[in-house]
Image (cartoon, helix red, strand yellow):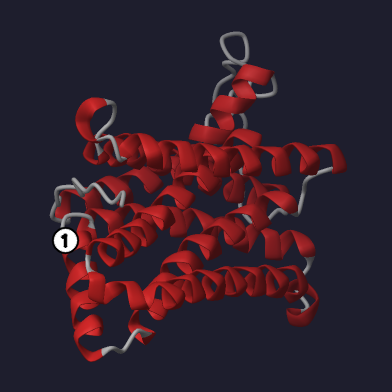
Amino acid sequence: MVGQVLFIVWRESVEALLVVGILNAWMNQNPEGRAGKPWLWGGIVLGLLMAVLLAVLLFTADSVFGLSQDVFQTIMVFVAAALIVQMVFWMRRHGRTLKKELESGLAQNAESANWWGVTVLAAIAIAREGSETVVFLYGMLGSASGSTLLHMSGAALVGLLLAGLSFYILQLGGKVLSWRLFFRITEVMLLLLGAALFMTGIDHLISMGILPTLVDPVWDSSFLLDDMSRAGGVIASLTGYRAQPALSGLLAYALYWVVVLGLLRRGPVQRQPQVKVAA
């Protein structure tokens, strides 16, 4: 669970930094764009406020909608899994042209001295990544104990620090790690994490009696890797591994990958951004 928090905060923060970094670099490199700097920072603050507002709404929604805590948390786990998969496909579609599209919009804003577009772009970038992080964390926080919450908070902070370090390293270009390789590696990790969240939702449905087990367990691989052990728990939280899986869980896991791999084969693969956005 802690590993999930660290990874998702790290990955989402890097994506937000990518968009904000492109905007900031263009403004630094173009004299006419420097007037838009306050609008950029205003968008960043607005995006953070929107993410905080979503967090408040989520933590009060269960009482507002009258759903039980277990049902609402299960829904949010499935939503988080769907958002993670959607994030991967969004970057595959827009990664190649992201820098060009942002800079084209900035040039138009500079010509008309209308910087509201910069505020909106920054706000959407921060709010989008922040909201996905909030939805993900909500599914984890709801069932966490006090000590686990403390560890998760520490993991989130480490994730933010690692995002800043990763962004700096990526600015060095191909000397250390390219954007293309970064996105390829994290795409795989995100899809595995989406599968893990999906399996957590399936486990909730089984525990609530909504989904039958069919056969439970199909096998027992605890002697090889117990998902209740420290190492096994990390792998389970990042991949969806189960040492004693129910048949319905296995079928759901297989369905997840059939759908994801089918979408990957259908959708066009775009080259990921080879950008250097440092000022």
Q: Residue visible at 23% across and 53% down?
A: 92
For the residue pair 186 and 140, the one nearer the viewer reads as 186
Residue at the spot 64% in from the left edge and 42% down from the top edge: 157
List x then y, in percent, for residue 160: 56, 44
Give the crowd class for mark 1: few <14, some 14-19, many >=20 residues within 10 Å.
some
Q: Eyeballing the image, is 233 above or below 84? A: above
Mark 1 element type: loop
The quadrant of the picture occupied by the N terminus is: top right
From the image, tell me which residue sits under label 1.
Answer: 97
83 or 177, which lies in front? Answer: 177
Residue 252 in the image, given as x and y percentages of width and height: 46, 46
As drawn, is 234 to the left or to the right of 30? right
Q: How many marks?
A: 1
The reply, left or right, for residue 222 in relation to residue 13 is right
Where's residue 16, x and y in %? Answer: 42, 57
Q: Residue furthest front?
A: 31
Three-letter residue code for mark 1: Thr
Q: What x and y, as percent, mark residue 161?
A: 56, 40
Residue farthest along the right direction in this orientation: 146
Locate residue 173 relative to residue 50 in the image: left or right: left
Tell me what residue is drawn at x 55 percent, y 21 percent.
Answer: 219
Question: What residue is drawn where x is 60% and y is 42%?
Answer: 5
Position above or below: 225 against 71: above
Vertical arrangement, residue 14 with respect to residue 80, above or below: above
Can residue 195 be seen by looking at this rendering? yes
Find residue 257 and report its image quarter.
top left
Q: Quadrant of residue 101?
A: bottom left
**Do we see residue 215 in this rendering?**
no
Q: Nearer the viewer, residue 180 or 267?
A: 180
- The correct choice, above or below, for 201 with respect to 118 in the image is above
